[in-house]
Structures are given as C-alpha cells and as structure tokens.
Amino acid sequence: RARGEKKTEDAIAVVEIEDRSLEILGRWPWPRMHHANFLNVLEIAKPKTIVFDILFTEADSEGDAHFAKVIKESGNACLAAYFSLEKNPSVLPLDITSFQKIPRLEYTIKKSDTFPHASSVTLPVAVLANAAKRVVVTNVPQDDDGATRRVPLVIEFNDALYPALSLQLACDYLGVDIKDVRILPRAVMLPSEKRIIRIPMDESGQMILDYSGPLATFRRYSYVQIIQDHAKSMSGEES
C-alpha cells in the first residue's frame, strides 16, 4: 500500500463467476454447455492461453462430449488440477492418461529438497483432460488469517516435480518450453528469447507475492456479461 499500485500487463484478463452470473445461469455447478458456449465466444478474441480455474471433477453425461470437442478445437484451453498437500488425504484413483497432461519439469528429486509435497491429485474428468492443451496445477495456499502471501512455483509428487499454474503461464507467455526451466536452490530460471528470467523462491519452493494492487488492478469481466454482449452483437443490438 505504501508503494502504491504497479503497472500491470494488459495481456492478462480475469473473468469472474460472480453473483450476477450465478443469478442468471443458475446454481453451481453449471451444465457444460455454458462453458462450451463461453469458450466459443472467447475464441473470437484469439487469446494466447485460456485457463479454466475450475475443477471439472464430476462427469456431465449430456455436455462433456460437446465441451471436449470445443476445448480440442480451441487448441489453447487449459484445465485445472489440484494437488493435495495433506499428509493423510482421501486418495482418489489416478487416471494415468489425464495425469500425463500435467507437464513435468526436468529435475531429479534430492533428499535435501523441501518443495511442497503432494500426497494425491484431483484431476478433471478424462474426456475433458484429454482434450485440453494441458492440465495445470492451481494450488493457492492461505495463511492462518486467510490471506495468500505465497504461491508454490513447483510441487513434488511421486518423486517428480511439476510446475504450478503461475510458473506454467509465465512459460506460455514468454514462449519457454517447460523442459528448459532450470530449478536452482532458491530460484527458477526461465531462458526466454530476450533474456534469462530469474524468479526467486523460498526454501519450500514458494514465491512471495508482490501484489500489483487490488483485484481491480487487472482487467475484469463478468462471465455472463461476455456471453450476453456477444449475443447482442450477433443480433445487431448495442451492448
């Protein structure tokens, strides 16, 4: 707050599922047809990457096939997975095909490593995961007071290291292959075309957040408003 807001990247936009969207589209979870329609509308703007920060863990027999088709055709849609960091979680069966959609870092785990260690993973339903560009890990831990001050850049699972959402999206934006990322004791190195970017992290593999400002610092849009504005434009109405 004392520093003031920092300039943010115009290429980043946040689409919110807020109260108005829930009022119009109904109770959560929504039928997959809504997400398929939404993705079709977003593709008009030709975004580089789309991330659904939603866990699609329950099957929708009526809508999954169509949503998967739209995801596949987009070629740039990523779906969310969640690593459980609990010591004794309720372990879910691991769908190997879906799990392989999570990129893996080229790194050999050492006994001295203290990265966040996952004991299980929650994946999207297979038909959606297999259609996605990739599956990304969306863990966002909170401190005891409910605030988020750190986010993991990497998470260990089954003796391998995986990038969290923040690191994967940075690589996508900079055009860095995740296999080229270097893991150092206190940093992650991204060899982009213009320069090598060093992202510091603490001993537990987490990045201390340097907030640019409040949520309104980034461009924000309503999920349902995007759909409605598109419908109006198609019918010749002004939004």
Image (tube, rainbow, N blue to C red):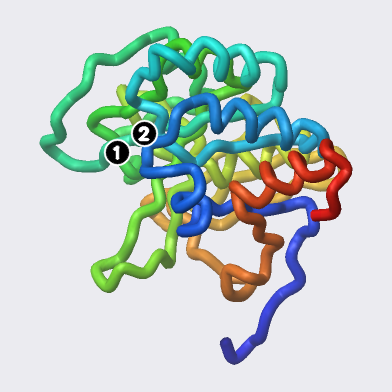
Q: Pinpoint residue 24: horizontal percent, then vertical percent.
A: 50, 49
- Image quadrant in which the N terminus is located: bottom right
- Which residue lies at the image location 69% right of the left edge and 53% below the top edge? 13
- Residue receiving disc 2: 156
At label 2, counting other C-alpha atoms closer than 10 Å, the crowd grade (few under 14, some 14-19, many 20 or more) is: many
Under circle 2, the secondary element is: strand
Number of residue marks: 2
Q: Which one is nearer the viewer's eye here, 132 or 121?
A: 132
> Residue 103: percent from the left, percent from the top?
53, 24
At horizontal 31% and vertical 23% (from top left) the residue drawn is: 158
Closer to the chain start, of discs 1 and 2, is 1
Residue 90 occupies which quadrant of the picture?
Answer: top left
In this rendering, does residue 97 appear at all?
yes
The crowd level at tag 1 (other Cα within 10 Å; few <14, some 14-19, many 20+) is: many
Q: Nearer the viewer, residue 100 or 190?
A: 100
Residue beneath label 1, please? 117
Secondary structure, mark 1, is loop
Residue at 76% across / 41% down in the picture?
230
Q: Which mark is residue 174?
A: none
Instruction: Confirm or deny contact between disc 1 and disc 2 (CB under 8 A).
Output: yes
Residue type at tag 1: His
Across and down, in percent, residue 219 comes to: 71, 61
- CA distance for labels 1 and 2: 5 Å
Identified by mark 2, the residue type is Glu
- In percent of the image, x 55 and y 32: which residue is there? 34
Residue located farthest toward the bottom when viewing the structure as drawn: 2
Q: Give the residue furthest to the left.
A: 88
| 189 w.r.t. 57: above or below | below
| Image position of 156 with respect to 20: above or below | above
The C terminus lies in quadrant:
bottom right
